[in-house]
Amino acid sequence: MELKVLKRSTFPIRSEEDIVKARQIVRNWANEVGFKLVDQTKLVTATSELARNTFVHGGGGEMMLEQVEDGTRSGLRITFQDHGPGIPDVTRALQDGYSTAGGLGLGLGGAKRLVHEFSIQSEVGKGTVVIIVKWV
Amino acid sequence: MERIPILKMGKFLLVSIQVDMHDRLALTLQDELTARIVEENAKGVLIDISALEMVDSFIGRMLANIATMARILDAETVVVGMQPEVAITMVELGLSLPGVRTALNIEKGMEILNSLLQSETQDGTEGSET
Amino acid sequence: MEKAKTLYALLSGHQNEILRQWQKEQLAPGVLRSDLISPDELKQQMEDFLRYLVEAVKKDETEDMSSLEAWKEVRSFLTEISKTQAKKGFLPSETSMFIFSLKKPIFQLLQSYDTEDLEKFASDLWKVNTLLDQLGLLTMESYLKSKEEIIRRQQEEMLELSTPVVKIWEQVVAVPLIGTLDSARTQMVMENLLQEIVRVSATIAIIDITGVPTVDTLVAQHLFKTVSAARLMGAECVISGIRPQIAQTMVHLGVSFQDITTKATLAEAIKYAFSRVGYRISKGESTK
């Protein structure tokens, strides 16, 4: 079934405050689309992880938020894009325990477990794009 | 600058996180809390996160760090009031906060700290008090 | 100069005639579901729909619904009708016939006016055909969507019914699990249990799996997740009712129940839970 985009907005991720804003915006949208509280929390948490990656590792970028529908389901698609150094080994970056910022290394892999669809494209020297989708 | 207040209650410190923290604020809290433990000679720390709508790996790490640092400074930490949806998300994310004590609410957290303190002083009197 | 007429002119000029013919089709005995809808209500729906349709054709001469703005009202009206029909219990074929039965009156009309100009006739026929087919598909899509919603809601209701969380004493709750545990169900159990823990301020929760026929690695993982989440909130979990076969399977699968309190029976679990919250079970005089 074809994916229909009902609503779209883009937000900058250029500071720590923007990460907080991104969480709040996603919370509002998720609430409007009709996500249950648990699923809202999962999506907001995934957003927090990915927005932080965009800011800390990607040197800033933007988040595109879309309300989507594929005929029977509605959901949110979120795209995080940066033009930073990129990730040399994406497979390894998705493993738990992989960490560059001295964190717990749960960022990418953890975020993946919190959503229904997850895709990542990264090119060294060009930047990284992560797209997640969660259905209601 | 924005700050999260740290309250003193007898031998314990109480922190109630009421705002959506950005990362710097979380780190500031970690610094100030460890400083206050030493300053007040606190034996326990209660962190109330009932108002937190999410705990991601960054905040999770902060909570774990506080507990570890507090233990080195001879204080016990109890994280209280985590909401069910936050707990479910954390488990899915892979954060289980090993080594961090938890309680349903401030009252129960206080009970835990008190009983820990009691058993410690008992040990103290029985053992060699220098 | 009938043959020069646009499709809009044709439809709007004969709106009443089309409606009459269409209603005749839909209200015919054997077609009308008089048990589900009254003739008057159906007539009204058809009249309203035709009005929206003619309006949309006027706004959008491409007739292929490519202009979403022009077709917005037709789409939402049709979606609503199809959803209502699905809920009322119409068959899918009946719901789609609402649109497809409109073909005959319109084709007849085209036939009677366009015979002189074959090219225009063919092009109009194709336009109308495409249009009605698309609308027909839309009814099906909405119908299915509505049915799926019903199924999902019923599934959720069933899940809720099958996982009751009971408070057995101050600070002690229990959830007896019966039947196969899949991830959707475990999710539900987990959410219900954790919410109940908060609601009654329980410090200990018993998960009794006496009624669970098999526990594989995945189910075990789900159980562990529940235990971890409860611990994060400050409550302890006890898993009880692990039958010997299950214990054996667990060992064979290499699943470790380390750090998790397990008891063989529900009675043992209750005894343990009571002792944890400071109660003791003792035998008194029988009142019998």
Image: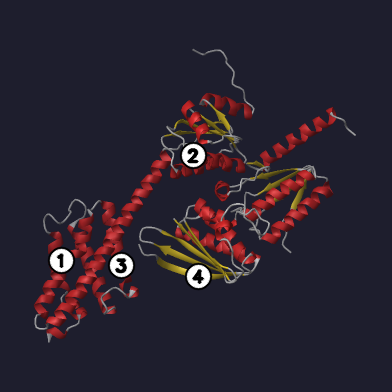
Residue annotated with mark 3: C75
| Horizontal side of residue C158 vs C102, given as left or right | right
Q: Earlier in the sequence, mark 1 or mark 3?
A: 1
On screen, C135 above or below B101?
below
Give the crowd class for mark 1: few <14, some 14-19, many >=20 residues within 10 Å.
many
Q: Mark 4 points at which residue?
A: A9
Contact, mark 2 vs mark 4 (Cβ under 8 Å): no
Q: Which residue is drawn at 53% across and 62% down?
A: A26
Q: Which of marks 3 and 2 is nearer the N terminus?
A: 3
The amino acid on which the numbered mark 3 sits, given as a three-letter code, is Arg
What label does residue C200 carry, if any? none
Q: Which amino acid does label 2 sit on?
A: Thr
Which residue, given by chain and number where applicable, does mark 2 sit on?
A: C217
Mark 2, mark 4: which one is toward the viewer?
2
Q: Are marks 3 and 2 in contact (CB under 8 Å)?
A: no
Q: What residue type is labelled 1?
A: Trp
Whether residue A20 appears in this view of the structure is no
User: Which residue lies at the image location 19% right of the left edge and 56% below the top edge?
Assistant: C38
Q: Which of C191 and B69 is in front in this view?
A: B69
Q: Name the residue under label 1.
A: C22
